[in-house]
Image (cartoon, grey):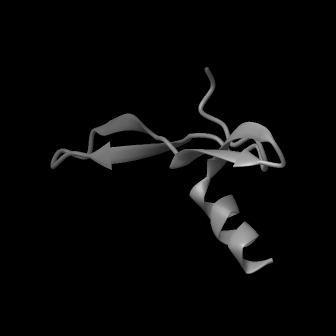
């Protein structure tokens, strides 16, 4: 299953680690997904969206 937020569509990003000799190694930075029930539906929602929902 895809690592994407069901509400905003945000997914994983790419980042790079640099060694002492400046060689780039790409890594994948996953988002923090939580399983929540919203309006009777089970969704995978990122913590950024959960924080925004609490404000409203």
Give residue 9's position: percent from left, percent from top.
76, 43
Q: Quadrant of residue 44?
A: top right
Number of marks in picture: 0
Q: Residue at x 45, y 45 (%)?
A: 15
Give residue 36's position: percent from left, percent from top.
64, 46
Give residue 53's position: percent from left, percent from top.
74, 68
Q: Which residue of the protein is positioned furthest toward the left in this rendering?
A: 20
Closer to us: 41 or 53: 41
17 to the left or right of 19: right
- Quarter of the picture containing the N terminus is top right
Q: Residue at x 40, y 35 (%)?
A: 26
Closer to us: 20 or 37: 37
Q: Quadrant of residue 55?
A: bottom right
Give residue 24's position: percent from left, percent from top.
33, 39
24 to the left or right of 53: left
Q: Is residue 5 above or below residue 56?
A: above
- Quarter of the picture containing the C terminus is bottom right
Q: Which residue of the protein is positioned furthest toward the right in this rendering?
A: 39
Q: Which residue of the protein is positioned furthest toward the bottom in this rendering?
A: 55
């Amino acid at each position: 299953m895809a690592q994407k937020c069901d509400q905003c569509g945000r997914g994983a990003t790419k980042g790079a680690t640099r060694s002492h000799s400046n060689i780039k190694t790409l890594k994948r930075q996953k988002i923090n997904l939580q399983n929540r029930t919203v309006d009777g539906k089970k969704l995978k929602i990122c913590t950024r969206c959960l924080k925004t929902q609490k404000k409203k």
